[in-house]
Amino acid sequence: MSPARHPRASSAKVELLRDSADAVNEAPGLSESLNGAFGGPKKWVRLNRSISRRARAGYSLIEILVVLAIIALATAVIMPNGARLLDQAVAQSVFFELQRDLLELRREANRTQSAILLRSASEREADAPGRVLTMRPGWSYDFAPSLEIDEAGSCSPSEIILSGDTGVVLNLRVSGRDCRLIRYLPAAAGRR
């Protein structure tokens, strides 16, 4: 087995063989004298090509660094948008949970024929009697004024402020007698 075809040939040996093959191909006298020993010039060309293919198998450090830089840039662009989308999805989920809880309380008030008063979670029981809704961890709500659901299941007008760990996330208004929640933007202070 020739050293160039040996699977464990080191890169230094491969370089030496490549240089030798190039030197033989470029030197006309030497190439002609070795024709009988190694099967002629065509064999040398094949040997030189197989060495260069083996030496070039794999990726260079520059190519790997370029790919890593592209991945890092794509991650830097995508991550803030992904975090914002995740926050919006969680806020939407909390909004739907609140709406579902209000619907269940309307049904309970209608079934039991008794009014239900909902107070803010931040208010004490002694200051404002009524029920408190349970929210997922990190979320809270405030009613202004307290929300009353009468015996027929109709809601009094009220505003709800949903707050998360990052601050106020949604401002909601209870609209109509059917307790429909509508999102709105509060008026900015100082604007007329």
Image (cartoon, rainbow, N blue to C red):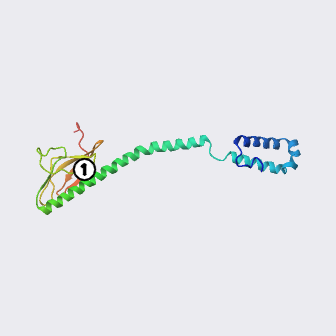
Outermost residue to the top: 190
In percent of width and height, residue 104 lies at: 20, 59
Q: Nearer the viewer, residue 185 or 76?
A: 76
Q: Is 82 situated left or right of 169 in this image?
A: right
Q: Relative to 17, say whether 96 is above or below.
A: below
Residue drawn 40% across the image and 47% down it = 82
Residue drawn 20% across the image and 56% down it = 102
Outermost residue to the bottom: 111
Q: Quadrant of residue 124?
A: top left
Q: How many marks?
A: 1
Q: Quadrant of residue 109?
A: bottom left
In percent of width and height, residue 88 lies at: 33, 49
Residue drawn 85% across the image and 44% down it = 31
Residue highlighted by disc 1 = 135
Q: Quadrant of residue 122?
A: top left
Looking at the picture, which amino acid does disc 1 mark? Answer: Met
Q: Is 98 situated left or right of 118 in this image?
A: right
Residue drawn 70% across the image and 42% down it = 11
Q: Nearer the viewer, residue 31 or 187?
A: 31
Q: Nearer the viewer, residue 20 or 29?
A: 20
Disc 1, SS: loop
In percent of width and height, residue 183 lies at: 26, 50
In percent of width and height, residue 75 lies at: 46, 44
User: How many other residues sit within 10 Å of disc 1, few (<14), some (14-19) or many (≥20)?
Assistant: some
Q: Is 33 situated left or right of 135 in this image?
A: right
**Where, quadrant-wise, is the C terminus in this rendering?**
top left
Q: Is 57 situated left or right of 191 in this image?
A: right
